[in-house]
Amino acid sequence: MSGNPQLIEEMRWQLRQIEERKADNQRLLAGIAGSEHTTVTSPDRSVTVLAGPGGVVSEVRLAPEAMRFDAITLSRTITAAIREAVSAGRPLAQPPAPQAPPAPPQRPRRQNPADDDEPYDTVFDV
């Protein structure tokens, strides 16, 4: 049984693309894990937020005195600290844009339709 060479080549291309994306994702994750985080502390020092590249929040720390605030004040303090940390974070490296798969080969057209044994306008005409 012989396989379709075009299908096999397209599958190989897709596997290469998957491997490249996997390597790109591993590089991005390593950059996030090993990079310096931006640390923002609220003015009253009750909330500290750590954000990595691209503004990804990795940690929110509450000091014991934060528990003395009412829910609205605490939520506003946390939100303000997160917004500041996210905006201060450095941008992530952009992964490369995906490439389009190779175009399938064109089926050969009949050069001389007059030599066909079939009549025109049938379901077999291409």
Image (tube, helix red, strand yellow):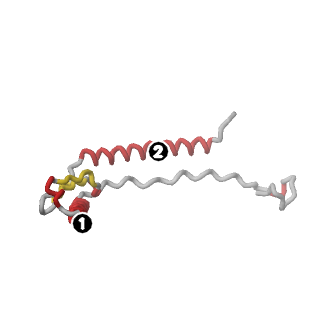
In front of the other: 51 or 74: 74
Looking at the rendering, which quadrant does residue 5 occupy?
top right
Question: Which numbered mark, 2 or 1, is in the foreground of this view?
Answer: 1
Quadrant holding the C terminus: bottom right
118 shown above or below 18: below
What percent of the width, then of the height, locates residue 20?
Answer: 42, 45
In front of the other: 67 or 77: 67
In the image, 66: left or right of 108? left
What percent of the width, then of the height, locates residue 93?
Answer: 31, 54
- For numbered disc 2, what is the local secondary structure? helix
State the residue position of label 2: 18
Looking at the rendering, which quadrant does residue 38 occupy?
bottom left
Gap in angstroms between the C-alphas marked 2 and 1: 46 Å
Name the kind of residue labelled 2 in the image. Ile
Residue 87 shows in this picture? no
- For numbered disc 1, what is the local secondary structure? helix
4 shown above or below 118: above
* Residue displayed at 33% across by 45% down: 27
State the residue position of label 1: 72
Q: Residues within 10 Å of mark 2 (few under 14, many from 20)?
A: few
